Image (spheres, rainbow, N blue to C red):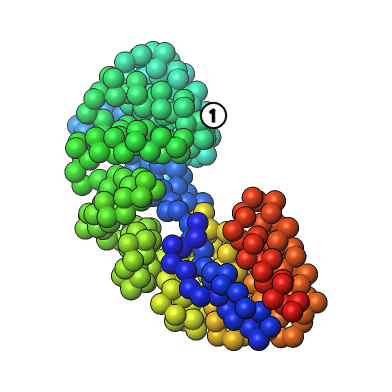
């Protein structure tokens, strides 16, 4: 997505054009949906409470303590020990105990749920779904099993099936805030922003301190163009959980959209204090600085984004190079801009704007032949894209250069 703010074109001694200079931006990410994470942020903690432990008195009994140290023989004790192992992070040991408990008593729906949770944490998504399904066969009205299966289906990207599970869980237990939240995430993934908004709102009615629900509802509002509403939700999320780097990043993007570029930079820097290895935050900080004409600082921020090269989200890394090139053009560093455009076009050879501005830089260095080649390529691409306005501007630049 391109910034609404546009600055005058770079002028060269050979080319006169009103072609706008722009810095690229992108839509916000859902909280907890960035690369390397799971779709349902905080899901492990949610799943953890699904583990169905026996009464606390039993868990502290001498028999249970002995079971931790030696072989366990009854299903209840094996289930208890499995829960203990799970809480200690020994997921494989927990799975083994739950499996033995089920061999002794295969009608325990809760133990199937427990093993499903452990399998999920061990990365066995298919096994987890199979266990939740078995629990549902034994106890069709087990809301927790439907909810947990929905979680895993969401992680797998089976959003429609996940929505069906969350919906069934809510039919059985309308107070299950986590199911509203999970269904909201899936609806957002499928592009159903009104449905996602309604689910996040209902989750917040049941759990007013759910920072992720505020964060994700803010994302929906931003995508729908309600940046003021998004700002309110992001701020509420920060008040609840000020450690979340992602919410500062998204609030910064809404502040930028509202014209508060300095406030946006403050938020990007707050985000980077919490996670300095986030290329998105460095990228957006650079874009805001460039819009404030602080080109040297913007270049340094783009440099950092490319050095970190991690967690780009929905930003194309090629855009960091094209944006840095534009800032270099504004600084008069035509050769540096050309080098950036060369690399950007290797990553994204269909970027008409990159060809155009590389042509501007080449013209400024007296390379008329190279500039014409770039302008002609830009014109071809704009024509293929059906972008008549940009095509005409490029044709005018060619005419001016040939005079």
Of 53 and 400, nearer the camera is 400
Q: Circle 1 sits in a helix, a strand or a loop, which is it?
A: helix
Viewer-proximal residue among 51 and 373: 373
Relative height, residue 241 to residue 67 (above, below) = below
Which image quadrant for residue 198? Answer: top left
Q: Residue at x 37, y 61 (%)?
A: 257
Q: Is residue 297 at all visible to an observer of this figure?
A: yes
User: Which residue is pictured at 77% across the width and 82% down the height?
Assistant: 367
Q: Residue at x 27, y 48 (%)?
A: 214
**Residue 214 versus residue 12 in the image, above or below:** above
Q: Position of residue 106 (x, y in %)?
A: 43, 15
The residue sitting at the front extreme is: 403
List x then y, in percent, for residue 277.
Answer: 48, 67
- Dot 1 corresponds to which residue? 126
- How busy is the neighbourhood of tag 1: few (under 14 within 10 Å), some, or many (20 plus)? some
Q: Name the residue located 69 percent from the left edge and 76 percent from the top edge.
A: 400
């Amino acid at each position: 997505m391109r910034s609404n703010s546009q600055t005058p074109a770079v002028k060269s001694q050979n080319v006169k054009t009103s072609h706008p200079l722009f810095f690229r931006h992108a839509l916000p990410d859902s909280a907890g949906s960035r690369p390397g994470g799971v779709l349902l942020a905080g899901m492990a903690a949610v799943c953890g409470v699904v583990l169905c432990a026996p009464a606390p008195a039993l868990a502290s009994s001498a028999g249970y303590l002995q079971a931790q140290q030696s072989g366990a023989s009854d299903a209840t004790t094996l289930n208890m020990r499995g829960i203990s192992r799970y809480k200690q992070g020994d997921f494989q040991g927990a799975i083994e105990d739950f499996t033995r408990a089920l061999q002794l008593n295969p009608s325990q729906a809760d133990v199937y749920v427990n093993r499903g949770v452990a399998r999920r944490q061990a990365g066995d998504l298919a096994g987890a779904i199979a266990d939740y399904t078995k629990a549902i066969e034994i106890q069709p009205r087990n809301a927790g099993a439907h909810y947990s299966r929905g979680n895993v289906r969401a992680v797998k990207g089976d959003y429609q099936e996940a929505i069906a599970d969350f919906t069934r869980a809510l039919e059985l237990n309308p107070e299950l805030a986590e199911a509203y939240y999970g269904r909201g995430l899936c609806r957002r993934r499928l592009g159903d922003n009104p449905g996602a908004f309604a689910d996040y709102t209902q989750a917040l009615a049941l759990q007013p301190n759910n920072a992720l629900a505020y964060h994700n509802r803010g994302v929906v509002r931003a995508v729908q163009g309600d940046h003021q509403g998004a700002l309110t939700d992001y701020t509420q999320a920060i008040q609840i959980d000020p450690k979340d780097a992602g919410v500062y990043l998204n609030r910064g993007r809404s502040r930028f959209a509202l014209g508060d570029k300095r406030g946006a930079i403050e938020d990007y820097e707050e985000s980077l204090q919490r996670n300095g290895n986030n290329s998105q935050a460095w990228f957006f900080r650079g874009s805001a600085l460039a819009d404030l004409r602080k080109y040297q600082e913007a270049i340094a921020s783009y440099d950092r984004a490319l050095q970190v090269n991690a967690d780009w989200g929905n930003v194309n890394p090629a855009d960091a190079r094209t944006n840095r090139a534009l800032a270099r053009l504004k600084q008069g560093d035509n050769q540096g801009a050309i080098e950036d455009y060369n690399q950007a076009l290797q990553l994204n050879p269909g970027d008409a704007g990159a060809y155009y501005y590389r042509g501007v830089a080449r013209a400024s260095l007296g390379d008329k032949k190279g500039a014409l080649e770039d302008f002609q390529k830009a014109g071809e691409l704009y024509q293929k894209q059906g972008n008549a306005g940009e095509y005409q501007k490029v044709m005018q630049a060619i005419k001016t250069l040939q005079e």
